[in-house]
Image: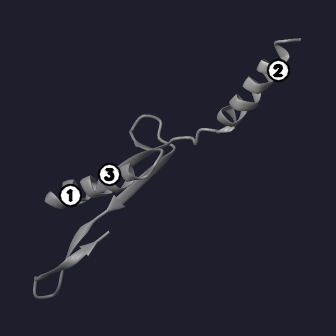
Amino acid sequence: MRYVLPVMLLTLLASPVSAQRRRPTVRISLNVSADGSINSTITSYLGREFRKLDDVIITDDKPLYRISCTAMRNRNQGGYFTGYTL
């Protein structure tokens, strides 16, 4: 009987800690298709932005989502560079 009160107190104190659930991690695979130097730049930028998100892991091993991106440089009729398309 004398152990009932300490056990109940420990149960009450430990229950909020055990009630917190861990959020699942999301595994993604990132695939960028682009020409030349913009491929590495876009891959680096997208990877950095996805790593800023909590619980997101970039991997090619059993991904839950596969994110693909195609990029190209735009030029006008005169051949001048005008921007990028993703």
Local secondary structure at mark 1: helix
Q: Nearer the viewer, mark 2 or mark 1?
A: 2
Local secondary structure at mark 3: helix
* Vertical comparison of 77 with 86: above or below: below
Q: Which residue is at the front of the view, 5 or 28?
A: 5
Mark 3 in CB contact with mark 2 (< 8 angstroms): no
Gap in angstroms between the C-alphas marked 3 and 1: 10 Å
* Vertical comparison of 20 with 10: above or below: below
Quadrant in the picture for residue 19: top right
Locate the C terminus and report the quarter of the image it occupies: bottom left
| Identity of the residue drawn at 80% across and 24% down | 8
Q: Which residue is at the front of the view, 4 or 33?
A: 4
Whether residue 47 sits left or right of residue 26 in the image: it is: left
| Residue type at tag 3 | Gly
Specify the farthest residue to the bottom. 78
Q: Which mark is residue 41?
A: 1
Gap in angstroms between the C-alphas marked 3 and 2: 52 Å
* Vertical comparison of 5 with 68: above or below: above
| Identity of the residue drawn at 38% across and 52% down | 52
- Location of residue 35 in the rendering, given as x and y in whole percent from the top left corner: 19, 60
- Location of residue 59 in the rendering, given as x and y in whole percent from the top left corner: 39, 39
Q: Nearer the viewer, mark 3 or mark 2?
A: 2
Residue linked to disc 3: 47
Is residue 36 something one can see in this rendering? no
Specify the farthest residue to the right. 1
* Vertical comparison of 46 with 29: above or below: below
| Residue type at tag 1 | Thr
Sequence-first disc among 3 and 1: 1
Sequence-first disc among 3 and 2: 2
Residue linked to disc 2: 5
